[in-house]
Amino acid sequence: MYELVFEPAFRSGYHRIKRAWPAVAYELRGALELLRVSGVLPAEYGAHELSNSGGNYNECIDFHLSDGVADVIVLYVPHKSNPSIRFVRMGTHEGLFRGPKSRAACV
């Protein structure tokens, strides 16, 4: 079992996304339960580590919700030695990657 830790920026993004796309909350709960139990997601979530020279979220893992219907991305970081996962941000692709540079980082 993994401990799930939610950063304030993640909680804020979650509430914003939930207002815009209420069904995403249900799908997110399923993904969180999978991560809590096993620490990994099935391939259909498209989870992958980010590595972009100069990017804000290097070393974060991102996965997509709503199968492209809504542009929703979740960023998280598994702890290297403890069984915990820290959820950093949640938002749209545009808001997370093309908006103003955030001070939030994954490392």
Image (tube, rainbow, N blue to C red):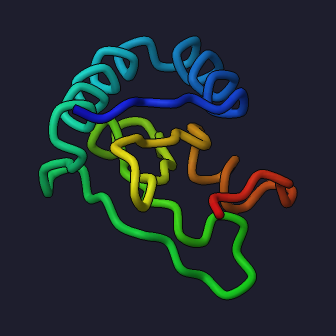
Horizontal relation, residue 56 to residue 60: left or right: right
**What residue is drawn where x is 75% and y is 82%?**
54
**What residue is drawn where x is 65% and y is 52%?**
94
Horizontal relation, residue 99 to residue 11: left or right: right
**What residue is drawn where x is 61% and y is 41%?**
89
- Residue 17 location in percent, x, y? 56, 24
Point out the image quarter for the N terminus.
top left
Total labels drawn:
0
Point out the image quarter for the C terminus.
bottom right
Pick the front one: 11 or 80: 80
Taking the view exactly as shown, the residue that stands out farthest to the bottom is 53
Pick the front one: 4 or 47: 4
Q: Quadrant of residue 11?
A: top right
Q: Is 76 above or below relative to 69?
A: below
**What residue is drawn where x is 42% and y is 69%?**
49
Taking the view exactly as shown, the residue that stands out farthest to the front is 81
- Residue 67 location in percent, x, y? 27, 43
- Residue 42 location in percent, x, y? 13, 50
Horizontal relation, residue 53 to residue 82: left or right: right
- Residue 28 location in percent, x, y? 34, 26
